[in-house]
Amino acid sequence: MRHLHHLAGSIGPRGSTTDDEREASRYVRDRFEELGLESHWERFRAPVSGWRPFALAAMVGLLSVGLTLWAGRVGAAVAAVLMGVATVSVFLEMYFRPNALRALVRKGDSQNVWAQVPPRGETELTVVLVGHVDTHRTPWVFTSPRRLSTFRAITTLGVAAFVIGTVIFALAGVFDIATLRPWSLALAPVYLLVLAVTLQPDTTPFTQGANDNASGAAVVLSLAGRIAREPLARTEVVALASGCEEVGSYGAQAFLQAHRDGFVGLRAISVDNVGGKGVGVCYTSVEGMVFPLKPSPELLALAEAVRRDRPDLNAYPLPYTTLHTDATAFMARGVPSLSFVGLTPAGVIPDWHQECDTVERVDPGTVERTEEFVLELLRRLDEGPSAAPEG
């Protein structure tokens, strides 16, 4: 809780690529060094907004409608190409891959800070414990459960409109089916709605981020200290305070790109939003906004065993498909992973991306139970019979 209070209370809002995000990273680095751990500070470039690629896709959609309606067959053919690139880029962006839309978004400097805690014996497994230090803005769509449900519906409708639009523009252009052109006009309101929803967030202030995600970063820091004092037998723990999770898990992506082949038996555990009131210890059963990504069967089975053996920790699994976590980025690249995300039993993250995500709203008991659960899971993984790579 000392770490949480400093990150959210003393530093406050920590927008991706901002000086305040760097101040949070410096705090983590100093704590690692106090523990006697060698810290690593690694810079990377990242977009300043996670919403902008989708706003650009909506703009491409509107332009494509205009070309199809008023520039004839050639216009429809050009629209099909533009919309096809935008649609593919949307899917690539949601699953952490380079794309044309990402290249058009302004970039800033961010950083990861990490430290290794070696085991007592020879390293047979490596687990990356990751908690991001940056905070999100406060979009209108996150200000109530009903609006969040509307956002989910708009997301689904928007993705469908991108795909359908590509098909209509292609048919109108390649086969010169003039009767299809007026149908493209029906897509314009959807593109306008997506544009409004994705432009508005970047006009709002950053949240203090006590739950999201000072809570997760604090758990990672605290666990690094506990494991440094009492190392595991065969499992190396890498404590990672990532940057720019809120704009697309760019810190997690940069870490994997630099270090994936440098660790033995790599696994990952993300800790995110674990301080909300009315929340138990929640771990995800599935992630991914369109195509489902499954957590590591090994880590999930261990979590289920801890849940059964420790009913006092009030743990349960739930699906998480609204946005992503750093573990989603690891899963998308085939790294066995598991996320801890503080969903209530009703599937809601308290104070998520809202100005009320303050220190006063955090439940210390939830944070402590999550830390205890993750530590027990790590110990059971360390005691396991096999160090062979999963899958």
Image (cartoon, rainbow, N blue to C red):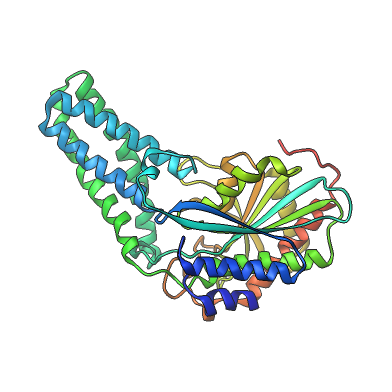
From this view, report whether residue 119 is shown above or below residue 388.
Answer: below
The quadrant of the picture occupied by the N terminus is: bottom right
Give the image location of residue 331, x and y in percent.
60, 44
Give the image location of residue 170, x and y in percent.
25, 25
On screen, residue 348 versus residue 280, left or right, reads: left
- Residue 57, located in which quarter of the rendered image? top left
Asked whether 374 or 73 is in front, the reply is: 73
On screen, residue 111 versus residue 267, left or right, reads: left
Q: Residue furthest top?
A: 175
From this view, report whether residue 344 is shown above or below residue 297.
Answer: below
Give the image location of residue 294, x and y in percent.
60, 43
Asked whether 10 or 217 is in front, the reply is: 10
Asked whether 94 or 363 is in front, the reply is: 94
From this view, report whether residue 139 is shown above or below residue 126.
Answer: below
Q: Residue at x 12, y 26 (%)?
A: 72
The quadrant of the picture occupied by the C terminus is: top right
Q: Residue at x 31, y 49 (%)?
A: 55
Q: Residue at x 40, y 44 (%)?
A: 102
